[in-house]
Image (cartoon, helix red, strand yellow):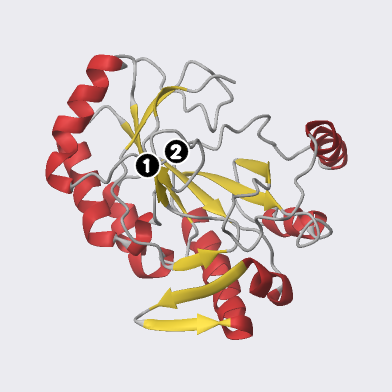
Amino acid sequence: MVKILHPCFDETESGCRIHLPIAKKCNTKCNYCKMAFSKCDIRPGVTDKLLDVSDVVTYVNESIELYNDCKIIGIAGPGDPLANPDDIFSALEIVSENYPDFKKCICTNGFGVEDCADKIKEAGIDYITLTINSINVNTLSKIYKYIYYRDEYYEGESAAQLILRLQKSALDILSSIKGLKIKINIVFIPGINDKEIDELIQFLCKFKIDIINIIPLLSVSGTEFGTIEPLTHSDFCEIKKDLENRYPKVKFKQSCQRCRSDARGRIHL
């Protein structure tokens, strides 16, 4: 059997993936993120168009014709997959039935893991990425404008406390699933969470995490953090190198392409 490699977990260009842009809604408002429809922007939360569940097989077949070495199908937006559970788990079931030798992957903020725990296990998801940016209530209240959870909106400190609880719970649940590989994305935001990265990494080391991906803030126009000056490449590389030296047992991702929600093909490292 040929070993399937995931470019975001295995640090390899030999992995090839297809993203299904079917997560229509999001359950929060991150102050660095803006969902958009575009053919040109290369960043998370962006897609050319939304994909309907009924079109999954056609879309995957067309994608395989273009990228015939692809063995990974992921859902990474443009909203949060677990904020769209009916569509997402229907799509994953279709993938399992029609492409049984493919690996399945989702990227999420983790807010819906508690409510979807059984479905996550039943779906046979192979890879999951959680974005966790802080474990401090004050900082979380700066990063997230609100969270929509179980038909209610939460803002400010109450939202931050809820986010902290849900993400800790998500880590507990996901760490207990045998065979599931877990990646943590941390958005490094100057002046917001940049002084807390050590604390966050030490906390994450308590769980079964396969790889940590620290991503420098991409200042997106029209967002709350759109005017924050991003780090230079050299400054960011220096920060990452320092973390690698101080946490030698942690596997840090070496590069991130900030993929679109409809990205297809090979990732070039």
Q: Give whichever of 111, 230 is nearer the camera.
A: 230
Q: Residues within 10 Å of mark 1 (few under 14, many from 20)?
A: many
- Three-letter amino acid code at the position of disc 2: Arg
In space, the residues marked 2 and 1 are separated at their CA atoms by: 6 Å
Whole-percent x, y for residue 219 in the image? 65, 49
Residue beneath the point at 42% across and 44% down? 46
- Three-letter amino acid code at the position of disc 1: Thr
Q: Residues within 10 Å of mark 2 (few under 14, many from 20)?
A: many
- Residue 98 visible within the image: no
**Does 192 sit above or below residue 69?**
below
Residue beneath the point at 54% across and 32% down? 9
Whole-percent x, y for residue 18 in the image? 34, 30
- Which type of secondary structure does the marked residue at label 2 adopt? loop
Could you tell me which quadrant the C terminus lies in? top right
Number of the label disc, if any, that sits on residue 248: none
Residue at image mark 2 = 260
Residue beneath the point at 58% across and 67% down? 168
- Residue 195 visible within the image: yes
Number of the label disc, if any, that sits on residue 47: 1
- Which type of secondary structure does the marked residue at label 1 adopt? strand
**Does 218 sit above or below residue 193?**
above
Count of numbered marks:
2
Could you tell me which quadrant the N terminus lies in? top left
Q: Is residue 73 left or right of residue 149?
A: left
**Does 156 sit above or below residue 72?**
below
Q: Is residue 207 left or right of residue 231?
A: left
Q: Give whichever of 229, 269 is nearer the camera.
A: 229
Whole-percent x, y for residue 160 in the image? 61, 77
Q: Is residue 261 left or right of residue 182?
A: left
Q: Are marks 2 and 1 in contact (CB under 8 Å)?
A: yes
Mark 2 or mark 1: whose residue is earlier in sequence = 1
